[in-house]
Image (tube, helix red, strand yellow):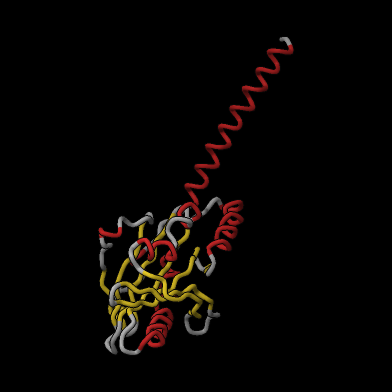
Amino acid sequence: MGVREIRLGALILLISGTFFAVRMAARYKADQIKDVHWSRVPYDLGSWRGKDIEFNPLYGGDPADTSLLRVYEDPLGGQVIVYVGFHRDLPSGLDEHTPRLCYPSQGWTILSSGTQSLGPPGRPWFEAREMVVGEGGQRRVVTWWYQTGHRIFDKRIRHVYELMLKAMWTGRTDGVLARLEAPIGPGGESAARQRIARFAQVFLPPLEHALP
């Protein structure tokens, strides 16, 4: 066997090995992606009572692979609108589907922005992103964060890098964008923020239980 045949054989083996490795890596990643279980998030959370709602078709479709969209009402008064979008490859959709971009594209004006502390009882609280938006005669407080399992991130860039590192070890890049939205009523922005914080205390534990 000549040198040319040996080199050709080695090249064929290299290409075949690379193809096999890519196939195995893709299969491994697919095996690592688990399903989300929205049924583990109850409709009754403490004093809150929830019901499913649908996307307004005027705003386009839901970019997530699967999502939870509900409105919860408290007998004491007030609503919290919940959206949790699960993405099997979250980094690929973060640039296009962040609340800072989505709300203006739907006709809402961002009136202010900042952070809000959220967390369940007995657990460390975290800083979620927040903005106050207005459209026509409506105003709402919108709070959101990114989450993978029990890991919560307030900043998109930090979440992307964390997911990249996680993907190197586990092959997983799945995660959610979670958003809590409260209409501003007679109590003003302060009452709406308190409503979101109070609801988050009973919502976060079952959400963690629902995520893979």
Quarter of the figure with the N terminus: top right
Which is more toward the observer, 74 or 179?
Answer: 179
In percent of width and height, residue 184 lies at 34, 82
In the displayed orientation, state which residue is furthest to the right: 3
Could you say which is closer to the camera, residue 47 or residue 141? 141
Q: For residue 205, say whether it is visible.
A: no
Asked whether residue 121 appears in the rendered view, the answer is yes
Q: Quadrant of residue 78?
A: bottom left
The residue that appears at 47% across and 57% down in the rendered structure is 94
Instruction: Count numbered badges in the picture.
Output: 0
Residue found at x 39% / y 62%: 102
Give percent across and percent down for residue 95: 48, 56
Q: Residue 115 location, x and y as percent?
A: 51, 77
Asked if residue 105 is positioned above or below residue 136 in the image, the reply reads above
Position of residue 211 measured from the top left corner of the image (x, y, whole percent): 44, 64
Which of 168 and 182 lies nearest the eye of the viewer? 182
In this picture, residue 54 sits left or right of residue 104: left
Rendering quarter of residue 100? bottom left
Left or right: 144 in relation to 163? left
Residue at 44%, 62% (x, y): give it.
98
Q: Quadrant of residue 39?
A: bottom left
**Front in this rendered view, residue 180 or 202:** 180
